[in-house]
Image (cartoon, rainbow, N blue to C red):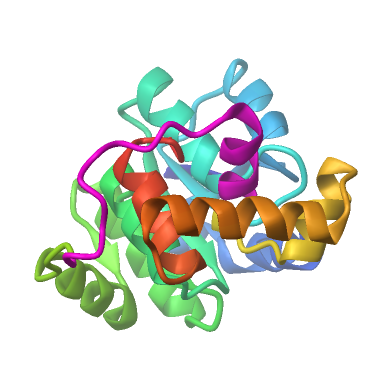
Amino acid sequence: MINVIVADDHRMFTDALQGFFTTESGIQLIGSAINGDELMQLLKKQQPRVILLDINMPGMNGITATSLIRKKYPKIKIVIVTMYRTPEFIINLYKLGVDGYLLKNSSKEELIEAIKTVDKGGKSFSDFVSDTVLKEKQYTRPEHFEDSKFSFSKRETEIVRLLANGLSTQEVADKLFLSFFTIESHRKNMLNKLNLRNTAELVKYAAHLGLLD
């Protein structure tokens, strides 16, 4: 029996998994968490063979949780199950060493097969994710990137991490108790200093520096 823990703040999704994992499937759900913080506490008590992990959750997000799990529990397999198709998320999580990445519109059969595949030491990525990773490997750093490493302030690092998690400028402002214009000013200032064109390139640069780990 493959023991699984799920970390997802959507209770309906977690409840649905209970119906997916029957005795016949050979998979058992032994625990659930609503965010990365709760997941890390849960892992102190029991370690599953596979973790199903969402990206955007209140508190500690899936990217940070993945980084911590890889350091503390390297033998546990991690499958990202999310609705996010953002290339920056996919590439960053791939580099962190996740074993699988499925979109939430995947079928029950695909999810079960993914769990069994990673449990045996394989990898399971949806076609969209595989294409994204392939494009990244073929990616050549454009000339407009600055070669010198820009030093991010603590506040700028906070902002970049939140943007990388899919938050809008207004959502970042609300979370940090700052105004929309303050966040937008920080964002534009970072783009100008680094000679970057948009938020996607800013997130990619931050990931390159390891600021999103």
Q: Is residue 50 visible?
A: yes
In screen coordinates, is 21 left or right of 168? Answer: left
> Magenta residues?
142-162
Q: Residue at x 30, y 53 (%)?
A: 94
Magenta span includes 203: no
Q: Residue 176 at x, y = what percent? A: 82, 42
Residue 154: image quadrant is top right
Looking at the image, residue 84 sits to the left or right of residue 58; the answer is left
Task: Tell which of 9 and 1 is nearer to you.
Answer: 9
Please, is residue 183 above or below residue 103 in the view? above
Q: Residue at x 11, y 66 (%)?
A: 140
The residue lying toward the viewer, choosing from 183 and 3, is 183
> Is the N terminus in the top left, top right, bottom left or bottom right quadrant?
top left
**Residue occupying the point 54% across, 36% down:** 65
Asked whether 144 falls inside the magenta stretch, the response is yes
At 87% from the left and 46% from the top, the residue drawn is: 178
Q: Across the whole image, how many numbered discs are drawn on residues?
A: 0
Q: Position of residue 82 (x, y in %)?
A: 55, 67
- State the residue in front, 76 or 165: 165
